[in-house]
Image (tube, rainbow, N blue to C red):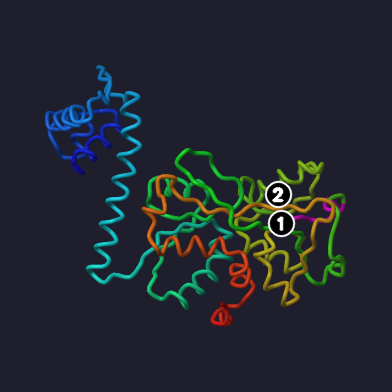
């Protein structure tokens, strides 16, 4: 029956029996026979056939949804049984966008390594579009992304953190004695930003525009391709920037930077967990649920992100 389901799913997705036969290394008559057997068993026609290919009927669309769920459950069962029989360690396929991957994920992984040493991770750091596509294709089981999320019926989004964008300047700057700044003051200083089209830049510009400040009024003196490059330039006194408060926590503690809140219009962006909507608690492994539950535990996550690596052993 699983073989029949796999054939049905392939034909439903390619909409072409010839192409499905090539991909599955089967003959076309064999494909057609298995589809016919399914239709006879369930008493419904699943495909409309034309010269251009095949399309799902309404009955076929309903059946397709259930077939995907069943195949996901069977695949997960095989992976868990295989891991148990071979004594394999737990493995989580994880993706993260740049800010999360560089400044949040290391602490989380260090904490999990200390408290759950039997879990391993395969991590991909990429942009939001790439992570989202990999989650859809189930190459990544959990994605952690910042800012706006692509809309798709097969993407399930859960917010786990709210990140504040702050004005960051060197500790020797005249404004360093202050705790906040107004929007009206921003255009008077040289601003260092991420490149046009980056997620952080897009969130910043959208937020400023919503609060009445045209981004074209900003005195942008430099555009750089990474947060770390921006931090180096700001530390040298070549301008100020607007970036995630999480990315400068250590430098602010060391009095290299001073971060100022935007007093009349604070800017926040969500950090979200992205999973495939077809992956339910039934198909997610216990290790994947462990990570997701940790991300939803705000008190624990706050403690993890506020500590240095050598302090993570003391967190309960």
Q: Residue at x 23, y 40 (%)?
A: 6
Please indicate whether residue 131 sits to the left or right of residue 32 in the image.
right
User: Would you name the residue on which mark 1 appears?
Assistant: 165
Q: Residue lying furthest top in this view?
A: 51
SS assignment at label 2: helix
Q: Which mark is residue 316?
A: none
Q: How many marks?
A: 2
**Residue ID at (45%, 41%):** 154
Q: Nearer the viewer, residue 39 or 124?
A: 39
- In the drawing, does residue 73 fall left or right of residue 199? left
Q: Can residue 136 be found in the magenta stretch?
A: no
Disc with the residue nearer the chain's start (2 vs 1): 1
Choose top left, top right, bottom left or bottom right for residue 40.
top left
**Which quadrant: the C terminus?**
bottom right
Query: x and y percent of residue 248 in the render?
Result: 68, 67
Q: Which quadrant is the N terminus positioned in?
A: top left
- Mark 2, residue position: 204
| Disc 2 residue crowd, few under 14, some 14–19, many 20+, Cα 10 Å | many
Query: In 3D space, how far apart are the residues under numbered discs 2 and 1 (Cα atoms)?
Result: 8 Å
Q: Is residue 188 magenta?
A: yes
Q: Which residues are drawn in magenta?
A: 185-192
Question: What residue is rendered at 23% in x and 32% in y?
Answer: 19
């Amino acid at each position: 029956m699983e073989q029949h389901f796999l054939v049905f799913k392939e034909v439903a997705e390619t909409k072409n029996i010839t192409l499905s036969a090539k991909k599955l290394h089967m003959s076309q008559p064999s494909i057609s026979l298995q589809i016919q057997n399914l239709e006879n068993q369930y008493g419904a026609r699943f495909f409309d056939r034309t010269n251009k290919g095949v399309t799902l009927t309404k009955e076929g669309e309903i059946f397709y949804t259930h077939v995907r769920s069943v195949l996901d459950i069977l695949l997960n069962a095989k992976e868990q049984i295989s891991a148990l029989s071979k004594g394999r360690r737990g493995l989580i396929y994880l993706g993260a966008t740049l800010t999360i991957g560089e400044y949040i994920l290391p602490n989380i992984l260090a904490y999990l390594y200390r408290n759950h040493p039997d879990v391993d991770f395969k991590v991909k750091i990429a942009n939001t579009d790439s992570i989202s596509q990999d989650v859809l294709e189930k190459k990544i089981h959990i994605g952690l992304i910042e800012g706006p999320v692509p809309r798709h019926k097969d993407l399930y989004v859960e917010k786990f953190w709210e990140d504040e964008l702050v004005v960051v300047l060197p500790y020797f700057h005249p404004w360093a004695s202050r705790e906040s700044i107004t929007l009206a003051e921003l255009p008077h200083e040289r601003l260092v930003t991420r490149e046009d089209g980056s997620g952080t830049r897009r969130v910043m510009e959208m937020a400023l525009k919503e609060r009445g400040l045209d981004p074209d009024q900003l005195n942008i003196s430099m555009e750089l391709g990474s947060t770390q490059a921006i931090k180096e330039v700001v530390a040298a006194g070549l301008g100020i920037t607007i970036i995630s408060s999480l990315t400068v926590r250590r430098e602010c503690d060391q009095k290299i930077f001073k971060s100022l809140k935007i007093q009349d219009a604070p800017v926040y962006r969500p950090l979200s967990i992205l999973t495939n909507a077809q992956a339910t608690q039934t198909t997610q492994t216990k290790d994947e649920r462990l990570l997701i539950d940790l991300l939803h535990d705000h008190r624990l996550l706050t403690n993890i992100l506020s500590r240095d690596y050598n302090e993570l052993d003391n967190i309960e």
